[in-house]
Image (cartoon, rainbow, N blue to C red):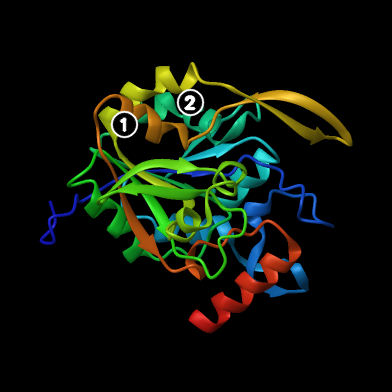
Amino acid sequence: MTLQGLPAEAAGIVLAAGKGSRMRGYEGNKTLLPLVPVAGPFEGHRPLLLEVLENLPPGPKGIVVHHRQEDIRRATRGLSVHYIFQSEMNGTGGALLAARSFLETAATDDVLITMGDVPLIRPATYRKILRELSRHPFAVLAFEPRDKAAYGVLELEGESVARITEWKYWRNYPQERRDALRFCNAGVYGAKRVVLLQSLDELAARPHTVEKERDGAWTVIREYFLTDLVEILRGAGRSVGFAVAEEDEVMGVDTPEALARAQNLYARRR
């Protein structure tokens, strides 16, 4: 343990498999987009993914890959990382299920699950998630937005998360109940490794049917959601904590406009 009572290491799983269909005009893996643009917004230095990897605490790191996976491998050549192939694009929960063997061999008590297109999360914020794991076996990174828009929200019971509720459900709540929902889900999580492994079979038994556009056609696919872990763990009598980040920290880079904003924020931070 460190002097601050945090673990010396934590395993990190970085989700970097998706194509990023909303990044108009770019066909590569969006986690390799630059934070320091040079010849236009899509060319430059400091890929998003490398910033994420550097900001994670020490420990074994697994990168979930699929789209343009060879580009990911080239960009991270020389780094001590494991590559986890997600054979089917079946959601964030599917990415975690693909990482089972990595989790089984990672010699750490704690795990952080983050995304390769959310590069502005500071090391101190990841440490805040790990602090929650001293009290809870699972923790959610949250933020308090200026506008809740269509984000998933955290419904709390005291200092624990009771559930993560998607917008299509909470938008129908009475106004007073909607106003009481302060925190939104950033899509980044921490977990005790053993507890997480124990939950994977139940996660695998909970596919969702989702209609998505693939290659210009709408198709029905089965996806798995990381957010289901909250319900799974609560059903097993375990508590779920949360840590709070700044809204700009957890912005995802999924459109050209978001990329420009992230590049601007990164330049100001430097």
Horizontal and vertical percent for residue 55? 41, 61
Residue beneath disc 1: 234
Taking depth in this image into account, of 150 and 246 the one nearest to the observer is 150
Q: Is residue 177 above or below residue 199?
A: below
Residue 124 sits in quarter: bottom left
Which mark lies nearer to you, 2 or 1?
1
Taking depth in this image into account, of 11 and 225 the one nearest to the observer is 225
Residue beneath disc 2: 97
Amino acid type of the residue that numbered disc 2 sits on in the rendered structure: Leu
Q: Is residue 126 above or below residue 168?
A: below
Q: CA distance from mark 2 to mark 1?
A: 19 Å
Amino acid type of the residue that numbered disc 1 sits on in the rendered structure: Arg
Horizontal and vertical percent for residue 120? 50, 66
Task: Inspect this view and state whether residue 61 appears.
Answer: no
Q: Earlier in the sequence, mark 2 or mark 1?
A: 2
Local secondary structure at mark 1 = helix
